[in-house]
Image (cartoon, rainbow, N blue to C red):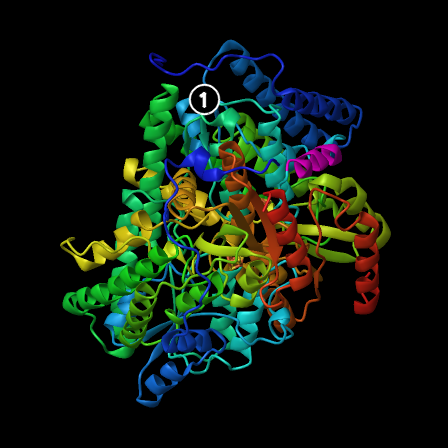
Amino acid sequence: MQATKPRAVLCEAPPGKGESELSTKVKSKALKEFQEATQMLVNPALQRWKDQGGRVIGCYCSYVPEEVITAAGFVPFRMRGTGSAGTDMADTCVSSINCSFVRHSLDLGLRGEYSFLDGVVWVNSCDHVRRIYDHWKRKIDTPYLRLISLPKKVDEPQVEWFREEVSLFRESMKDHFGIFVSDERLWKAIKLHNETRRLQRQLYELRKRKNPPITGVETLAVMVAGTAMPREEYNKLLKELVDELSQSSAGHSDHRARIMLIGGILDDPAYIEVIESQGGLVVTDSMCFGTRIMWKDIDEKEKDPVTALARYYIADRPSCARMFGDQPRRSAFIKDMICEFNVDGVIAERLVMCDNWTGEQFMTGEDLKEAGIPYIRLDRDYINVGAGQLRTRVQAFLEMMGR
Amino acid sequence: MTTKKLRQYKYDPDTFNRYRQERDYFNFLSGILATMPDSMSQLSKEITDITVERYDQIVRCAEEGKPFVAGYFCAAPEIYEAMGLPWYMIMATPFLAASAPYLTEDIDAAEAMGLGTDWCTACRLSLYYIEAGLTPKPWALIGLIHPCDAGNMLHQAVARNKKWRDVPIFASDPPYFEDQRGIDYYAGELRRMVAFLEEHTGAKLDLDKLREVCRETNKQYEILSEYTQLRRAHPCPHGWGVGGPQAFAATQVFQTGRPRGTKWLQQLYADAEERVKNKTGPVPKERIRYFWFDLLPFGWVFELMPWLEQEWGAVLVMEMFGLQPYTPIDLRNEETIFKGLAKRNLYDSPMIRQARGPADYFASDIARVVKDYDIDLVIWPGHMGHKDGSASTGIMREICQELKVPYIHIGLDLFDKRYTTPEECKDKLSKFFSAMGLG
Ligand code: SF4
Ligand code: SF4
């Protein structure tokens, strides 16, 4: 592939003009807390919450309407496989053609590492994750389990179906925990989550700078922490971080290219660290620990909060690969991101055995080829970053871009 | 039928060569079967003949500019039949003609397109055929976004494919659990499918015709269900060579709601009944009765299944496509018919039934088949595309342990014999049989 200048192809004018090259990195207390939270399952803030008798509900996909959990007064916790050392126990349940995220997170569950959870909620995200539900149900003693039936299309009948699903979810919370999630509580939670999204977008705005004040590694930590901490506390810390970074003129100037990352579940900053160590600064993404969960807000003007949630999850937010009929919109979203963030090249990562992202990588590749955007597809394992091979592939990619 | 204002596709004589080749391949098989006078070969020949007829019909439609669609066995073929719309599956090759000689070559070509190798080979092949212009371009496409991620992604990729970007596509959204709410919702999706087909083909759905088709299918499934009861006999009257897959082809693909299909099922039943009376099975001595819990390895079926019979006296007593717990459709009114179609296509249809929803179906089907059919061995082939099934392997193993029946998970590609070669499969099975004291 020829070295290309994507913004010349896709975008009208490169953003970030006129900023000076700076190389000072911001040191932030908030950032440190976020980074710590990505390295463990139960971070100190979550532990404090538990110590005070707070409840935590695991969520197996970014399509779980977490606002309902927050509205019940609980902390939604995005399931991960952080800290897993092997998959021996999970391997008695699933097979080697199942993705490593599934094997590691199930293994942790089977080993009792998720005993801090009061419940786990799934959607039928993919063929692998939906089976964790089946095994969990049979083997792990978590008091509350629920699988929400998530449509695979993004049209009005699907919004309506999901509205009912959210209602049933809310009812089941009442049945199990005795907590009625009133509309009022739901609106409050929606506002709180929208506030998170707004702050996260502000953080991403800063990455549009010529010399972004925050790296991809750091940003991922911020995003992952947002799925593992009590929400108010997270928002407070995030505001601190955004203010700090906004006021600072420090930034990363020592990169060779601005990279956009695309894919599914990536919660390990070590992966991005390898990319950035080669000079590929990750400035934006379409990931489920990234823009897809915060680029749009839930409409607070909608009359009914359950409808607002359903419409947001099904139709409004940037969709996941599994949503049929929405690929052109996803592709357009990626192209917009490339322009807005002045991206030089796109890296698509996927976990081996993942069909959703295989198909999506293929289609995105075809679209970006047509648009003349440098693009590379990388396979990975959930725990083992495979630094050596990744480094080589990234180096080759940057060289191919003429960087 | 009015075809006013409908898009007409220009016929290109150089396209869909593979489809034509497939028709010729079936013709060839039919010729061979004609020389074999035994009843099982003759039953197979009838299915091969009706397959050729459908291929011919689609080719004619394409050549003459008449509407035809691409659809699926589990996406209400009763409706296409009632609308008078000839249809075919874009997955026809892997599902129906995978033993054709060009398959390996095509799998390599699909790989060269850059399609990930851990993506179901059936999907890769289907996308390759479209990309390479080897499959007929329909007036409208009914996609399938369940039971697996692979199929969902295939249909998204087909929709974005340059060559087919102008082919309108619709796919019904599957609810996850089996309940009345799910049936009602899916019935709504099927109604939307009808509206879509009417818009893009000009064909209209007549309720009386649909009722007539459904009435005939009710008959077909009743006979099929009686036939499957006969397979409980010792010895099992038929083996892998005739039964479920052909019955599936008749009821759900080529003869949905047609008397000829019903007649074929009656013949199948009569043949099995005769064999049960005479205590005749496919092998002289039935030593192992196995449940093959998937599609047959269509890509290399002749290299494994006869060996199982000859070498081990192992008889396929039941497989996924023969296991059809069909509920008759209530023909009273439009609503009952659509709900019946929803139930049948979403919750009863083979493979869709097991793979779409929770893993309980894997467990309950095994329990039922093992008990009802006196099964000695459950084989989960573990097709590389069936990620949800292989993610249920622990549940299947446990249920087999409870039932005290051996369970083996092979790990293969139903279409590409290079993934796990037939020899490797045989070796694995032989060792397992010996270790379990089977045969
Ligand atoms: S990476 Fe793919 S297979 Fe694994 S959990 Fe995510 S969507 Fe499912
Ligand atoms: S994985 Fe199975 S159900 Fe899915 S496309 Fe392949 S063969 Fe079909």
Residue A53, position in %: x, y?
A: 31, 88
Q: In the rendered structure, which amino acid carries the disc numbered 1? A: Trp
Q: Quadrant of residue B331?
A: top left
Question: In the figure, A241 relative to B90: above or below?
Answer: below
Residue B110, position in %: x, y?
A: 66, 36
How many callouts does the rendering have? 1
Which of B128 and A197 lies nearest the eye of the viewer?
Answer: A197
Magenta residues (range): B103-113
| Lateral position of residue A239 relative to residue B393, left or right | left
Magenta part, dominant SS: helix
| Lateral position of residue B43 relative to residue B191, left or right | right
Question: In the figure, B304 relative to B208: above or below?
Answer: below
Disc 1: host chain: B
Residue A239, position in %: x, y?
A: 28, 69
The residue labelled by disc 1 is B139
Magenta segment includes A91: no
Number of residues whose C-alpha sits closer than 10 Å to that of mark 1, classed few (under 14), some (14–19) or many (20 or more):
many
Which of A201 and A288 lies nearest the eye of the viewer?
Answer: A201
Is residue B333 visible from the viewing direction of this image? no
Which of A152 and A248 lies nearest the eye of the viewer?
Answer: A248
| Lateral position of residue A55 relative to residue A217, left or right | left
Q: Quadrant of residue A70?
A: bottom left
Residue located 22% across and 55% down the image: A308
Residue located 76% across and 47% down the image: B281
Magenta segment includes B109: yes
Residue A24, position in %: x, y?
A: 44, 66
- The quadrant of the rendering that contains the N terminus of chain A is top right
Residue at the extreme right of the image, as rendered: B311
Q: Secondary structure at mark 1?
A: loop
